[in-house]
Amino acid sequence: MNITFKAIGIVHSPLKKLEDIQPKKYADAQGFDSVQGELEIFKEYEDGLKDTEGFSHLIVLFSFHKSEGFRLHTRPLLDDTLRGVFSTRSPHRPNPIGLTIVKVIERKGNILKVAGVDMIEGTPILDIKPYTPRDQKSPIKSGWLEDKIK
Amino acid sequence: MNITFKAIGIVHSPLKKLEDIQPKKYADAQGFDSVQGELEIFKEYEDGLKDTEGFSHLIVLFSFHKSEGFRLHTRPLLDDTLRGVFSTRSPHRPNPIGLTIVKVIERKGNILKVAGVDMIEGTPILDIKPYTPRDQKSPIKSGWLEDKIK
């Protein structure tokens, strides 16, 4: 069964290409907090952004559009052991969907100015969701990642 | 631009149909914590589950397969005001992708037993990602939802 989605917008980012992403920033939960960018939602979907500015954080789903193919075992940026892809945030996954939680700075019409951007310029946006108390999990256990993060 | 994804598995849930979901449970951040179910990942992707059991929580992306069409302004289950769809978790969205963070109970081969299930039986799974410290945001502001939740 195939499921077809379409871009609802595009990311504008100071990270212009994959090489602009510093892997070591992923070792710090706040590593990308200072990276600001814009989520440009296409005009036809602008009305759907109403009320988003009331939330401090939004979940952005996007397409890993530069990713080709996938590996079920993958070596994460922060590790030198092969890990199951579903225990990593690798872009090389069976369905190359990315997820980043960003902080809202402001909304101007169809543009959300946000912080915490780790997507590259031109990334197609699939969905935006509010980050809610249901998404705050604590305490958590982070498996192989536990001793890689500060 | 259309982007095509495929199911990598299927949710097994005590919630057999949409009517089995009690909307008021969404008013409580722990409302679904006691609902257990299974994520059955198709055999061909089983190897990708390696290491997932080291994480206490996983992010599940799934298809809102019962959802038809979308509205940019929608009345949330917990509110009586029309809200922008991207400020809600409504299934009726331009790209009907759902997101739920579940707690891992155990893994047996291609089956993850989890808690916190709010998906119905037969929901197609698109992706599984580890929930990491980068996903723990606090403090947060929850806009219109603020005074609807306990």
Image: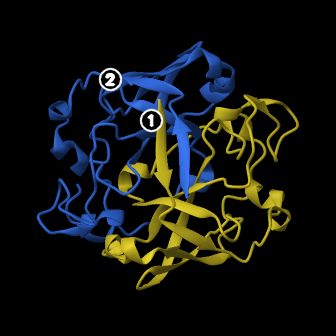
Chain colours: A blue, B yellow
Of all residues, the one furthest to the left in this rendering is A80
Residue at 64 percent of width and 25 percent of height: A49
Q: Nearer the viewer, mark 2 or mark 1?
A: 2
Residue at 43 percent of width and 71 percent of height: B56
Q: Residues within 10 Å of mark 1 (few under 14, many from 20)?
A: many
Secondary structure beneath dot 1 equals strand
Q: Residues within 10 Å of mark 2 (few under 14, many from 20)?
A: many
* Amino acid on which disc 2 is placed: Ser
Q: Is residue A137 visible?
A: no
Residue B122 x/y as whole percent: 66, 69
Residue B19 x/y as whole percent: 86, 63
Disc ID at residue A13:
2
Left or right: A110, with B65 as reference point: left
Q: Is residue B113 visible?
A: yes
In terms of depth relative to the viewer, which is nearer, B1 or B146?
B1
Q: Which residue is mark 1?
A: A102
* Amino acid on which disc 1 is placed: Val
Residue A61 x/y as whole percent: 48, 41
